[in-house]
Image (tube, grey):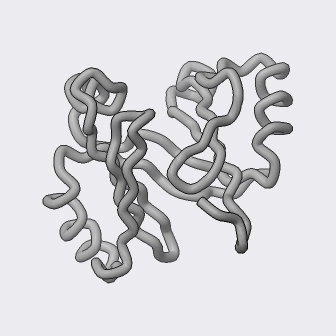
Amino acid sequence: MFSLDHIGIVVESLESAVPVWCELLSYPQSEVEYHEVPSEGVRIAMLQGNIKLELLEATDPAGSVQRFLEKRGQGLHHLCFASTDVDEAHARLGSGGLTLLNEAPKQGAEGRVFFIHPKSASGVLTELVELQHNGDSG
């Protein structure tokens, strides 16, 4: 069983979007966590609260987030669900007929992740993350 971890939103600029979302959701800007994920061509800002938002800004002009922005504009990009074992979830969902976008889980900003193609999930790009446990490095 999975639980909602965060909602991913593509933005043109973190500098412009973070203050707006922090104000809208009463998140303290001083607590926003920033990460760069070069393998995905993206910089992210994580807004932590009763709802966690991941704002994504493209850093690679040929990357998938930039293509998303050009095609659809700013907006909802993906839903992410937390898993206790992404290897098991990857094997089970892949053998269950879902189209997975990764051959195996890979390291993301907050833990090991893989993505499910929107065509297999009612048109929604879906991410599964195995959260790092306290004491883990990374």
Of the pair 94 and 113, the residue shown nearer to us:
113
Of the pair 68 and 58, the residue shown nearer to us:
58
Question: Is residue 123 placed above or below 30 in the rendered structure?
Answer: above
Question: Is residue 67 placed above or below 87 in the rendered structure?
Answer: above
Question: Is residue 61 placed above or below 2 in the rendered structure?
Answer: above
If the image is split into quadrants, where does the C terminus sit? bottom right
Q: How many marks?
A: 0
Question: Is residue 90 placed above or below 25 in the rendered structure?
Answer: above
* Residue at left offset 74%, top offset 51%: 83
Q: State the image quarter where residue 60 is shown.
A: top left
* Residue at left offset 83%, top offset 22%: 96
* Residue at left offset 32%, top offset 48%: 43
Of the pair 33 and 101, the residue shown nearer to us:
33
Q: State the image quarter where residue 68 is shown.
A: top left
Across and down, in percent, residue 22 comes to 28, 73
Tell whether 47 sits left or right of 82: left
Across and down, in percent, residue 51 comes to 49, 68
Q: Residue furthest front?
A: 137
Across and down, in percent, residue 67 comes to 28, 24
Tell whether 121 sits left or right of 15: right
* Residue at left offset 27%, top offset 38%: 58
Tell whether 122 sits left or right of 48: right
Across and down, in percent, residue 131 comes to 67, 58
